[in-house]
Amino acid sequence: MRFVVRRLSMFLFTLWAAMTLNFFIPRFMPGNPVQALQARIRVKESPAALASILSSFGYKPNAGLVPQYLTYLKDMLTGQWGASIGLSLGEPVRDIILQAMPWTLGLIGLTTVIAFALGNVAGIVAGWRRGGTLDSWLPSTLVVTANLPYYWVGMLLILLFATTLNWLPADFNYDPTILPGFSPGFVGSVLQHAVLPAFTLLVTSIGGWILTMRNNMITTVAEDYVRMARAKGLADRRIMFGYAARNAMLPNISGFAMSLGFVLSGSVLVEYVFNYPGLGYQLLNAVDNNDYPLMQVLFMLYTVAVLVALLAADFFMVWLDPRAREKG
Amino acid sequence: MKFASLVKNRKALIGLILFGITVVVSLFPGLFASQADADVIGAFAPNLGPSTAHLLGTTSYGEDIFSQLVFGARQVLVIALAAGGFATVLSVLIGITAAYLGGVVDEFLSLITNVVLILPTFPLMIILARYAGTSNWVMIFVLVATGWSYGANQMRAQALSLRNRDFLEAARVRGERRAYIILFEMMPTMTSLIVANFLGSALYSVLAASGLQFIGLGNRSSDSWGTMLYWADSQEALQAGNAMWIIAPGLAIAVLSAAFALMNYAFDEIGNPALRPVRRKDLRKAKKAAETLEEKGAGHDAYVEAV
């Protein structure tokens, strides 16, 4: 119980720290939403007039920082996220998020799960068959592919499959000439547009999973309980998954939760390269245009996503590992 | 951890060579570049293909891509080494202090470490870099501020396991000051972890800095490889048929990060022999040993031990 309380209070503190940082960093730095608006519309308009436009959408440059901060915290937590004061001026932040979220969840979320599952299975096999063909060439290759710049891999894929071969589209999430709906044409178009970004993420993220899983397996295979299982004459497959892999997986599960932060980070650049209108794409828009409300909500959501994943990993660990149950 | 064992490991050797090439290029760019200044707009015809005069062609501004690549090496390397170095120093100090002092200090430092670890790094970096300006020092600050926490956790764990060793007790009995014990007694025993950590942070810095530069958050007038990609992307080099402008800087980033990654992974292998690749020769030897033992289970053990 004490462990749960400590863990939860740490999470709450993290959330608060994230929200506070994201409130103060933009406000203490040069540049403000009025200047960004002026640069965007290219019409001669006095800063005062522009400021009054923005303030009608909730921008309060003249209020003191402390009261602003307090209302900000309250609004963030109660879901009153206000309206954008950036590129999509006046559009409720909630709508922007709701539009972008399914694309990021679908593309990034699904790809991450696939990479994790495939990577772990490959790692289990590579670690089990020590010295096999898979095990001898995989590590060196993966060390390199796991550390390629995501966005550059995306650009190479565009160069090859979109510009040169003309097989797949290079930007956006679907063909805008097709009416969105559950028609085969639309679904096909969505899938077609997802292939290149998904493949980019898969290529660069799978290597890390295979490597860590392989290394964990190698350590676990040498354990006494694996030897014991062998002595009992159990089938190889049963020892591999039920004895070795089950234990070797444990560090990878909390690793998966932590990696979600990295995946979300990498996805910002992938969405940028492919002009894929997900959350990362919106984040860059928001930062470019000093769109405080949108930026704040996105940053909070990113933090919440990682925290929820960590919490889920904690529960999953308890379910998988009896030792964790005793401690909790 | 000897230099000889680094050279014997094939991954480490390749990494070391790639890193060495980058260092030489960044120290003496004049030897490799065909011009003294690679940023003169309109120095040559725009969008030329590769030729003997321009090994990698020219940009749409008429600059020589190869020369830019050569001058960019120093920019990237300085950021990687400085950010990696500072981040490692910070993680060592925070991690060891937390572990050695324990109690409230440990609680506090661990809390801060975990919070920074959980915060979404890249979005935070984007926001920091966007508002703090574009000099290389700002970039280094951003990388250090977001990149120290992972190492600090590792250092703390390692230092905790050392805490009650006799040699530290002896130093305490001698009446050494805490700072002395931390710096001169504990730190030397953690050298290999510290080096591995430095390589990891440098790798992370190369990738993150290039990513930020790629979206235009770096110093846009430098020849950094990420910045080259930014200009290539904003000038639509792919559509203009100038593929080299995209391929070359990205490949350079990939090579440098591969160098750090290979050295880092090799460090793991040297520290943990079980992870080392199995050579055919050793495998045959192990099989022979196993055949002499009839029982299947013992055969496997002999195999494991021989490996």
Image (cartoon, helix red, strand yellow):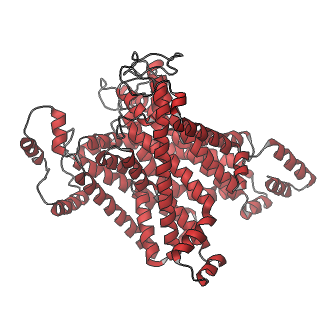
* Left or right side of A193 for A80: left
Residues A131 and A2: in front is A131
At a point 53% along the width and 67% down the height, the residue shown is B156
In the rendered image of this protein, does residue A295 appear above or below residue A21?
Answer: above
* Left or right side of A194 for B6: right
Residues B99 and A125: in front is B99
The picture quadrant where one finds residue B210 is top left
* Left or right side of A251 for B290: right
At a point 6% along the width and 42% down the height, the residue shown is A49
Residues A160 and B104: in front is B104
Q: Residue B175: horizontal and vertical position, in percent? A: 57, 83
Q: Residue B266: horizontal and vertical position, in percent? A: 65, 49
At a point 31% along the width and 54% down the height, the residue shown is A300
Residue B232 visible in rendering: yes
At a point 18% along the width and 50% down the height, the residue shown is A82
Split into 4 quadrants, where in the image is the N terminus of chain B?
bottom right
Q: Residue B219: horizontal and vertical position, in percent? A: 36, 39
* Left or right side of B93 for A224: right
Tag count: 0
Q: Residue B17: horizontal and vertical position, in percent? A: 64, 39
Residue A90 visible in rendering: no
Residues A167 and B2: in front is B2
